[in-house]
Amino acid sequence: LLHLFGPLYINVYGLFIAIGLFVGISAALFDKKLFHIIDQDTFFSFIFYTMIAAVAGGRLLFVIEKFKELPSFISAFKLWAPGYSILGAIVVATGFSWYYLKQRNINPVTVLDRIAIYVPLVQSIARLGCYFAGCCYGLQTTVAWAVIYTHPDNLAPLHIALHPTQLYSSLLLLSLFMILYRFQNYFKHRGQLLSLYLIGAGLERFIVDFLRANRKMVMGGFSSTQLVAVAVMSVGLTLLAKAFHAKRKQQSF
């Protein structure tokens, strides 16, 4: 909690999610290519409902993975509390976006290609909220940049040097945003930017999860989250292969 004055506090976890959404949406508003595809009114409605879907998906996958660790069944519905899965948010938000845009006769891939550039920026900033809240913490370590939590309100173990896995995720997602933004003009064919985002986001989660504490192992030393990450990367690779196939087919004519 960030103390303002008197009895007023701000939940830092939620604050960074809000900052991430504000920065990401603000950046997207300057994307002229995006608004050649979708008008602003439809865009804002699309963002609003997709955010609800992302919150629901992120919370759902977290609850599924951590159900036995929850203090009560009611706590699963405490949406203001830390505890969200980025991969759950990606899967549900992408599926919902596809349906929502199809219902309005807008090609989903063309819109999601542009949106995919800014999503990792939102995620990168939101991850800082995880860092300050102490959720999604890493394994015990002796590295020089380890983080040690001391405040009793943090969710991480106290007075132990831990891998700052939240910062690893934040830096990798920021790098993904910078790559997509810098090289967006090199990927002109429909579906390429979306597929690269899915591959990058899945790869980030797969790598960082090796250093996360309290991993739920399910198969061959891999966690359930890593299996979901592999599925997300597989979808991205499939879309990328289709995009390159369509490009070669178009060039042959």
Image (cartoon, rainbow, N blue to C red):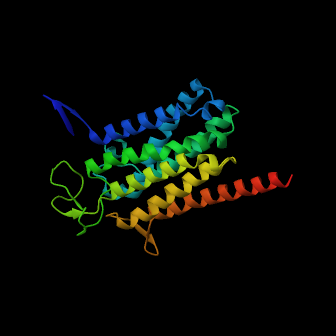
In the displayed orientation, state which residue is furthest to the top.
41
Q: Position of residue 116 (x, y in %)?
A: 55, 45
Q: Can residue 73 be spotted in the picture?
A: no
Q: Position of residue 149 (x, y in %)?
A: 19, 55
Up the image or down, 145 lies above or below 38; here it is below
- Answer with left or right where residue 96 lies relative to residue 106: left
Q: Position of residue 73 (x, y in %)?
A: 34, 48
Please tell me how many numbered marks the rendered image carries: 0
Q: Nearer the viewer, residue 7 or 32?
A: 32
> What residue sits 44% from the left and 47% below the top?
58
In the displayed orientation, state which residue is furthest to the left.
6
Q: Position of residue 170 (x, y in %)?
A: 38, 52
Q: Nearer the viewer, residue 182 or 112?
A: 182
Instruction: Name the image quarter holding the N terminus.
Output: top left
Up the image or down, 78 lies above or below 246; here it is above
Q: Nearer the viewer, residue 83 or 141?
A: 141
> What residue sits 34% from the left and 40% below the top?
16
> What residue sits 51% from the left and 48% below the top?
90
In the displayed orientation, state which residue is furthest to the bottom.
220
- Answer with left or right where residue 174 lies relative to residue 47: left
Up the image or down, 161 lies above or below 251; here it is below
> What residue sits 40% from the left and 39% below the top?
20
Q: Nearer the viewer, residue 106 or 24?
A: 24
Q: Can residue 236 be spotted in the picture?
A: yes
